[in-house]
Amino acid sequence: MSGIAPMDSVSTSGNTSDMPVVVTTLSRRSGLRIEERKVLAKRLERLTPREREVAYAVFLGGDNEALASKLCIAMPTLRTHLMRINQKLGTTSKGDIVQYVAMSLLDAYRKGSITASSS
């Protein structure tokens, strides 16, 4: 079992006031605010919790060896997670995953779902 807990457990009821977010070591290091994590959890809900962890780790950057080490998984397991993430998101590379996450956040800011002054 990995030393990293799932990135989040978010209610999909549509009511954002009852969205509990489990903040883990990885998400704290990401510098993402609670509102940003909520938006991303919704946008990435088709991913498993572990796949979301991998997507967040990819967003933070690093080569495959560093990501596997950070996530405490073997390289073949990382490649499997990346393949499944790419299939589910319609992406083809780690760069595309980073762009998907970044664009999801940018879209939320533009729509007012997240404001620059919210904490």
Image (tube, rainbow, N blue to C red):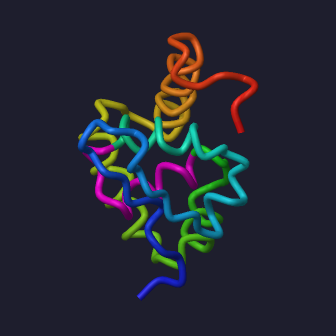
Q: Residue 17 at x, y = what percent?
A: 43, 43
Who is closer to the viewer here, 7 or 80?
Answer: 7
User: Where is 30 relative to 80, above or below?
Assistant: above
- Give the image location of residue 23, x and y in percent: 58, 63
Above or below for 18 versus 99:
below
Q: Quadrant of the N terminus?
A: bottom left
What residue appears at the point 50 percent right and 41 percent down from the top-left corner?
94
Q: Residue at x 48, y 61 (%)?
A: 7
Residue 81, position as x, y percentages in the image: 35, 58
Magenta residues (range): 45-58
Q: Is residue 26 magenta?
A: no
Q: Position of residue 95 (x, y in %)?
A: 54, 34
In this rendering, the count of numbered labels is 0
**Residue at the spot x=29%, y=58% of the render?**
48
Residue sticking out furthest to the bottom? 1
Quadrant containing the C terminus in the rendered view = top right
| Furthest-front residue in this view | 17
> What residue is rendered at 57% in x and 28% in y?
102
Residue 56 colored magenta?
Answer: yes
46 horizontally vs 2: left or right: left
| Image-quadrant location for residue 46 | top left
Q: Is residue 40 left or right of residue 112?
A: left
